[in-house]
Image (cartoon, rainbow, N blue to C red):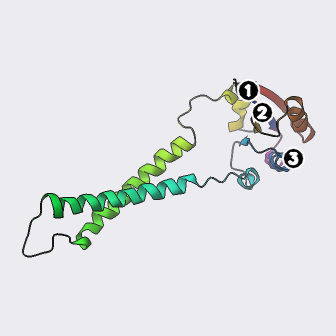
Amino acid sequence: MRKRFVVARFAGPDELLTAVQTLRGRGYRKLDTYSPFPIHGIADALEAEDARLPWLVFLCGAAGALLGYGLQYYVSVIAYPLNVGGRPLHSWPSFIPVTFETTVLLAAFGAVVGMFAMNGLPRPHHPVFGVNGFDRATTDAFYVQLDSDDPAYAEPATAEALREIGALEVVEVVA
């Protein structure tokens, strides 16, 4: 089945923010916006909070700490124990720098890979790029996109609702 969505263009950032707030109030949940600059309050209006990335970074950091410490413990105590001057084989203070570095390394890798994966990147083409005039979203146009798999989406009613709240142009896209 082909993906369908509606894209509407608005006159400015205030109109776009008002449109998103109105659409959220009418029950639409699967929204996305495109604008040439960040709009204060749009993330709150979209309720675009995702708590998966911080957890992924934490888990990757914890795995890095366990891996770094575990490798040093294995090498120093189990695989190749050396008694140098009567010092203990398991000297945890000397393991801290490497443990810290592996924690930071794997947490950073987790953040970068997780961000790319959760944002669906790299994505060289999105069907919304085919909308006539959408290239203006990087200079002076403000767009909102509503997905057809939204529970409140209805074929003619959604486009009409966008026109009612001030959309200058409404385009239906089939991807």
Q: Residues within 10 Å of mark 2 (few under 14, many from 20)?
A: many
Q: Nearer the viewer, mark 1 or mark 3?
A: 3
Residue 14 horizontal/vertical position (percent): 82, 49
Residue 26, disc: 3
Please identify the quadrant where the N terminus is shown: top right
33 or 160, nearer to the observer: 160
Q: Nearer the viewer, mark 2 or mark 1?
A: 2
**What's the distance in space between the residues labelled 1 and 3, CA to CA?**
25 Å
Residue at 80% across / 44% down in the picture?
A: 28
Residue 131, disc: 1
Position of residue 133 relative to residue 95, above or below, is: above
Residue at 23% across / 63% down in the picture?
A: 73
Q: Nearer the viewer, mark 3 or mark 2?
A: 3
Query: Is 90 positioned to the left or the right of 156 in the image?
Result: left
Highlighted range, magenta = 10-15
Element class at badge 2 = strand
Residue 128 horizontal/vertical position (percent): 70, 30
Residue at 52% across / 46% down in the picture?
A: 115
**What's the distance in space between the residues labelled 2 and 1, CA to CA?**
8 Å
Position of residue 9 relative to residue 27, above or below, is: above
**Residue bearing the label numbered 2:** 7
